[in-house]
Image (cartoon, rainbow, N blue to C red):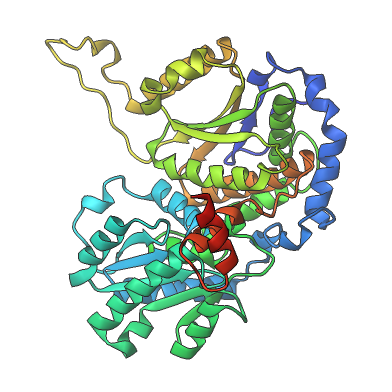
């Protein structure tokens, strides 16, 4: 295969790898092609390890209109009855929705007065911060709020604590019957503590499929309901993902996920152990957080895996720029550019010109931003930092759907290229066992005794 840029139709994301070729050769990339093709086949045909967690692969094209209608109707009910909705979840049950909403939101929405029918979306259960929960509950005291609680089991510590507190508060403020109408549970179809409670209390529910892991769940009700509550078009999100599902269904240079997975693994084999996801739009900060979980939890196994980091430029150029430019050469960057902005703002002229900016007067702020991006990419490549460049047409639901699916498909391919199971997370359980032992959870008596002896 002649590896060039990913050439897919306009109005879709584009992947450009030309600025990695000073650090690795085309042959380095092409050498991995047979294994990459095999890895894509494992993803598409569910023949690799972890194949019982591949329900996300055909999810965009298999999502029914009936399900989308149900999610939108539920979101509309919450939007009509609540001025605040709290989504409770952690990891993939939190980051996907947060990433999309923050990318689409007015940057100052939190500071604007509330509008009837447009509730503020808040998050809980993603930490065990006592001050955070106190302040959240204090904020909600005089609010008409609702809850979306997301957990397969209902016993994951962080969201379970948050739900217990907020459920009690909602019932106290509204009474049991009205509170039940304001709680939606997204959980297992048949089993688990949350499923049992939801059935007993009569909560509206949506199902987390057994074959979709948390970090791949943003295009399920886990992400779609909070995104719809925030007022965004989940049909366009799914349509964009469906376009990318089709665009990534065969190996070759026209498959952007395949190209990205190939390139980053060739860089890894050449000693580039750290990937830095770079954005030049502050609205993509939480997209970087979602991406870090997707790749960190999928690939960091068996003492292998590229370390995922993320920065917001140009902000972090004034804190991390020196290290990236001249630090240890074990890094590469994947840069996300947003081609079109939603608004226009020109730089004014100033007669005194004390700040010396008249040379850019009349230019769009985004033009300056893009020159900062281009100048930085050139400097970093010159400094020995290979760059993969991803262009997103705009921050709209369709293109975010494309980007989500692009990274998910590439993650599956990349994990198999590394010879790990991309869909489990055995290392995550270690801290939980220690925490339960330290808290003297029933059933952990031996572990409690053993860990206390180490303190």
Residue 288 appears left or right of 253:
left
Residue 445: percent from the left, percent from the top?
56, 68
Q: Quick one: 381 or 307, which is closer to the camera?
A: 307
Q: Residue at x 48, y 58 (%)?
A: 90
Taking 326 as reference, is 96 above or below it?
below
One can see residue 277 in this view: yes
Residue 110 appears left or right of 308:
left
Taking 176 as reference, is 72 above or below it?
above
| The residue positioned farthest toward the left in the image shown | 352
Examine the image and state in which quarter residue 187 appears: bottom right
Taking 226 as reference, is 377 above or below it?
above
Q: Quick one: 412 or 298, which is closer to the camera?
A: 298
Taking 453 as reference, is 115 above or below it?
below
Residue 15: percent from the left, percent from the top?
63, 32
Q: Residue at x 21, y 65 (%)?
A: 138
Residue 388: percent from the left, percent from the top?
61, 27
Q: Quick one: 392 or 98, which is closer to the camera?
A: 98
Q: Quick one: 197 or 60, which is closer to the camera?
A: 197
Quadrant for the N terminus in the image? top right
One can see residue 7 in this view: no
Residue 379: percent from the left, percent from the top?
51, 12
């Amino acid at each position: 295969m002649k590896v060039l840029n990913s050439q897919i139709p306009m109005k879709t994301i584009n992947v450009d790898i030309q600025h990695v070729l000073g650090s690795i050769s085309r042959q380095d990339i092409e050498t991995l092609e047979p294994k990459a093709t095999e890895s894509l086949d494992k993803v598409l045909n569910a023949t690799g390890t972890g194949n019982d967690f591949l329900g996300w692969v055909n999810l965009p094209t298999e999502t029914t209109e009936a399900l989308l209608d149900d999610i939108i109707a539920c979101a509309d009910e919450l939007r009509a009855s609540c001025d605040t909705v709290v989504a409770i979840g952690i990891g993939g049950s939190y980051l996907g929705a947060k990433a999309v909403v923050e990318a689409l939101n007015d940057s100052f929405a939190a500071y604007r007065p509330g509008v009837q029918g447009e509730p503020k979306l808040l998050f809980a259960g993603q930490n065990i911060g006592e001050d955070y929960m106190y302040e959240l509950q204090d904020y909600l005291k005089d609010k008409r709020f609702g809850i979306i609680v997301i957990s397969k089991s209902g016993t994951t510590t962080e969201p379970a604590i948050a739900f217990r507190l907020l459920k009690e508060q909602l019932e106290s403020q509204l009474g049991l019957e009205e509170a039940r109408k304001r709680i939606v549970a997204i959980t297992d179809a048949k089993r688990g503590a949350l499923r049992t409670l939801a059935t007993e209390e009569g909560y509206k529910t949506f199902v987390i499929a057994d074959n979709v892991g948390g970090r791949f769940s943003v295009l399920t009700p886990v992400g779609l309901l909070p995104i719809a509550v925030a007022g965004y078009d989940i049909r366009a999100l799914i349509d964009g993902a469906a376009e990318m599902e089709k665009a990534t269904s065969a190996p070759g240079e026209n498959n952007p996920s395949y190209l990205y997975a190939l390139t980053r693994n060739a860089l890894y084999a050449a000693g580039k152990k750290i990937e830095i996801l770079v954005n030049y739009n502050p609205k993509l900060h939480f997209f970087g957080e979602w991406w870090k979980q997707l790749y960190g939890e999928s690939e960091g196994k068996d003492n292998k895996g590229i370390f995922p980091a993320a920065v917001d430029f140009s902000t972090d150029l004034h804190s991390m720029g020196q290290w990236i430019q001249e630090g240890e050469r074990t890094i590469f960057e994947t840069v996300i550019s947003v081609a079109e902005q939603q608004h226009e703002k020109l730089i004014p002229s100033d007669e005194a010109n004390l700040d010396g900016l008249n040379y850019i007067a009349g230019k769009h702020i985004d033009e300056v931003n893009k020159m900062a991006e281009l100048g930085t990419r050139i400097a970093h490549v010159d400094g020995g930092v290979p760059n993969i460049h991803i262009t997103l047409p705009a921050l709209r639901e369709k293109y975010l759907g494309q980007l989500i699916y692009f990274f998910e498909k590439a993650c599956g391919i990349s994990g198999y290229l590394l010879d790990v199971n991309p869909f489990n997370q055995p290392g995550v359980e270690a801290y939980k066992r220690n925490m339960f032992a330290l808290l003297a959870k029933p059933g952990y008596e031996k572990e409690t005794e053993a860990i206390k002896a180490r303190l």
